Image: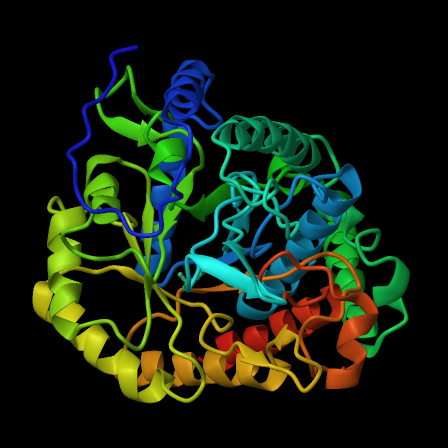
Amino acid sequence: MTQIQWPDLPAAQQPVWPDTQALNQARAELATLPPLIFAGEADQLRNSLGKAAHGGAFVLTAGDCAETFKHNTADSIRGRLRTVLQMAVVLTYGSTLPVVKIGRIAGQYFKPRSGETETVNGITLPVYRGDAVNDIEFNEAARQPDPWRMVRAYHASSATLNLVRAFTQGGYADLREVHSWNQDFVKQTKTGDKYELIASDIDRALAFMAACGVDPSEFRTVDFYSSHEALVLDYEQPLTRVDSRTGKLYDVSAHFLWIGDRTRQLDGAHIDFASRISNPIGIKIGPSTDVEDIGKILEKLNPDRTDGRITFISRMGVEQIKEKLAPLMSASFKSGHKPLWVCDPMHGNTKTASTGHKTRDFSDVIGEVVGFFDVCRAMSVHPGGIHIELTGDDVTECTGGMEGLLDHDLPSRYETACDPRLNRVQSLELAFRVSEMLKAR
Ligand code: PEP
Ligand code: MN
């Protein structure tokens, strides 16, 4: 394959690899490995996102903050997928809109961090940057960035995606299984009961259709797309290939890539990278986003104005959403573009609990989504989706919700490698609340 020459631009948040030779070897290895996704699939997703930008669909992006090699097990993958499928059922049923399903999965192994180093008990070491860079263990050897971990992350992502494709195409995601996704701890909760009612309605509707001789194949499989933050360019660049059909570049590490709030500098390497690939792209926008940048980002990344190419993922925090989002939407109107607007109600609402754990309160998460819907209504913009961090397990990382998790519950099952995630019951509860908002829209 011809290697692409990338311009030498400033790139924020890159690991300092101690061994250049190893880095070059690992990059060369990545460049020879097969694609994880096809360009045609990324195009199909872009079309669906375009539909959402025009009000004809709702996007659900969900998964881990940081995937880890340790938790890349069949149980964990199935748990996350099942949670997304249940949420999608609730959202589709409530809104009667198609739900585009995207996982933060099969590549979400890189993390931006606020500092270069971390100090514990007087010892200072490089910060953890995700399993694809270094190990979370706090010792000198573990924290050394090792480029071969990127190759391991590729193989882990490949195995994950293989299982996801089997689950979503091989019968597990069949709508007839709608009851069977609602097992174990969720079933004992009020939210689980509410879900059972919808599942029974869907069963009846399917039985009715079958009795009428209608049995569409669309009910047997679902389209489920992969996504992660395009952060470490030593991973993304070698996995960027020319599509033989069109001659265009695609990052074949995932269907959808987003640029984080810390790396969206207009003159930086990440935006330049995103401008060269044809995948659908997300841009996180936070309270510090300059209104002037909106039009510039849209022109730079989507000069052809392709529908579904750009998704703005707003992560303002419950306190600032009302004030900060509307001017950015106005700027996009002025530019003449029609991007998709999605709400990430997680990253602006992180705080430290009295126990010292990083947490988010469920009411802040809901509050930001309510604020997002309000702004969208006022601006006549379709509230196009939500982007959240969750797990399929019964973890205790975010407070609140109908189970009423309190600060002192957090230590009982706090497992995240980075940010606090909604557990399965909280995730379902969020889906019910959002589906009500969509109904009232
Ligand atoms: C993330 O999505 O995990 C993340 C780091 O988000 P942001 O760039 O919005 O802070
Ligand atoms: Mn996160």
Q: Nearer the viewer, residue 83 or 234?
A: 234
Would residue 59 appear left or right of 153 to someone viewing this image? Answer: left
In percent of width and height, residue 9 lies at 17, 42
Would residue 428 appear left or right of 394 to someone viewing this image? Answer: left
Give residue 250's quadrant in the image: top left
Q: Which part of the image, by quadrant, shows the N terminus?
A: top left
In the image, residue 126 sits, relative to residue 341, either above or below, namely above
In this rendering, the count of numbered labels is 0
Would residue 247 appear left or right of 405 to someone viewing this image? Answer: left
Q: Is residue 302 visible?
A: no
Q: Nearer the viewer, residue 207 or 322?
A: 322
- Point out the residue furthest to the front here: 122
- Point out the residue furthest to the top here: 1
In the image, residue 421 sits, relative to residue 240, either above or below, namely below
Q: Nearer the viewer, residue 207 or 200?
A: 200
In the image, residue 162 sits, relative to residue 108, either above or below, namely above
- Residue occupying image coordinates x 21% and y 60%: 338
Q: Is residue 259 visible?
A: yes
- Residue occupying image coordinates x 33% and y 72%: 286
In percent of width and height, residue 252 lies at 40, 29
- Residue occupying image coordinates x 21% and y 74%: 328
Q: Which part of the image, by quadrant, shows the C terminus?
A: bottom left
Would residue 337 appear left or right of 136 to someone viewing this image? Answer: left
In percent of width and height, residue 118 lies at 52, 61
How are the colours assigned in the image?
rainbow
In the image, residue 21 sits, relative to residue 332, either above or below, namely above
Give residue 319's quadrant in the image: bottom left
In percent of width and height, residue 67 lies at 60, 47
- Residue occupying image coordinates x 12% and y 63%: 295
Give residue 70's quadrant in the image: top right
